[in-house]
Image (tube, rainbow, N blue to C red):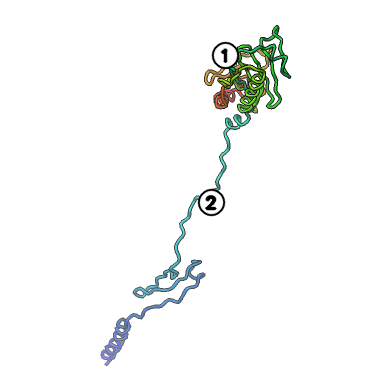
Amino acid sequence: MEVSQENRVEKEHEGSISELYSTPKTPIKAQNCSKEDAGVSGTNLSSQVVNGDVALTPTNSSFTPQPLNPHNSMTALTPMPSASTQAKSSIKLQNCVATVSLGCELKLLDIYCRTRYSEYNPARFQGVVMKILDPRATALVFRSGKIVCTGTRNEHDSYVAARKIARIIQKLGFPAKFLNFKIQNFIATADLRFPIKLEALQQAHGQFSSYEPELFPGLVYRMVRPRVVLLIFVNGKMVITGGKSRTEISEAVDVIYPILRSYRIS
């Protein structure tokens, strides 16, 4: 009896276990998660059942991840002008020398007696010095009909002044023409804004320069290309002569600037 009773208990226990494992799985549905529970902000999450497991997927179809652009946080910077550019910006034309031919011989004494603002002293200078006020310029008139016009600040004023001088002489009865006008020389100034060791510069560039402070306070530097002459002073200021165009003046500053910077007084 005890054995049969134990067998009955074992059978009942086995039946309950078989019922437990034979029952079908019911899908486990997860409740909707809030933003705080999911730990994700800005997205709606729902549950998807896969074999009794829960998978979370975004339900907002318009959601697209935005790639980070590292250039968005960059600020555009304006390039700083180079020191050579700053030196060139300080260039100022001080004088423009031009020549022109009238194509005829002139009587200088007649021109001197019949014009205003003119000077003529053949013992000192073999030419008539004529001056005009607008534009302000001075003309050297020679017997051969050659004229040297100086004192203007740019090419246009030099041309206008030479035309006016030729017209004045033409009105005096001379068969004057306006031939071969040409700019011969520009005189300009520039400021480098730093002091220079002129003695050391003359020792290193003796073949191109001369420096005699007892006679003249500036160093004379004769540049080969472009063919100009520079008067360089200890305070960093320069006078540039011999240039036939603005381009040559600018090129001369570009060439001389790195040389002078190496002899800067710190």
Task: Give the quarter of the image for residue 200.
Answer: top right
Residue 131's place in the image compared with 34, above or below, is: above
Q: Mark 2 belongs to which amino acid?
A: Ser
- Quadrant where the N terminus is found in the figure: bottom left
Residue 154's place in the image compared with 206, above or below, is: below
Task: Give the quarter of the image for residue 92.
Answer: top right
Earlier sequence position, callout 1 versus callout 2? 2
Lateral position of residue 38 relative to residue 186, left or right: left
Q: Which residue is mark 2?
A: 73
x 42%, y 74%: residue: 47
Check disc 2 and report its element: helix, strand or loop.
Answer: loop
Q: Position of residue 206 (x, y in %)?
A: 57, 14
Q: Nearer the viewer, residue 149 or 259?
A: 149
Residue 3's place in the image compared with 266, above or below, is: below
Lateral position of residue 71 relative to residue 142, left or right: left
Q: Is residue 243 visible?
A: no
State if disc 2 and disc 1 touch (CB < 8 Å).
Answer: no
- Quadrant where the C terminus is found in the figure: top right
Q: Position of residue 60 (x, y in %)?
A: 45, 69
Q: Mark 1 belongs to which amino acid?
A: Gly
Label 1 crowd (10 A; few <14 / some 14-19 / many >=20) = few
Check disc 1 and report its element: helix, strand or loop.
Answer: loop
Task: Give the quarter of the image for residue 161.
Answer: top right
Q: Which residue is mark 1?
A: 206
Label 2 crowd (10 A; few <14 / some 14-19 / many >=20) = few
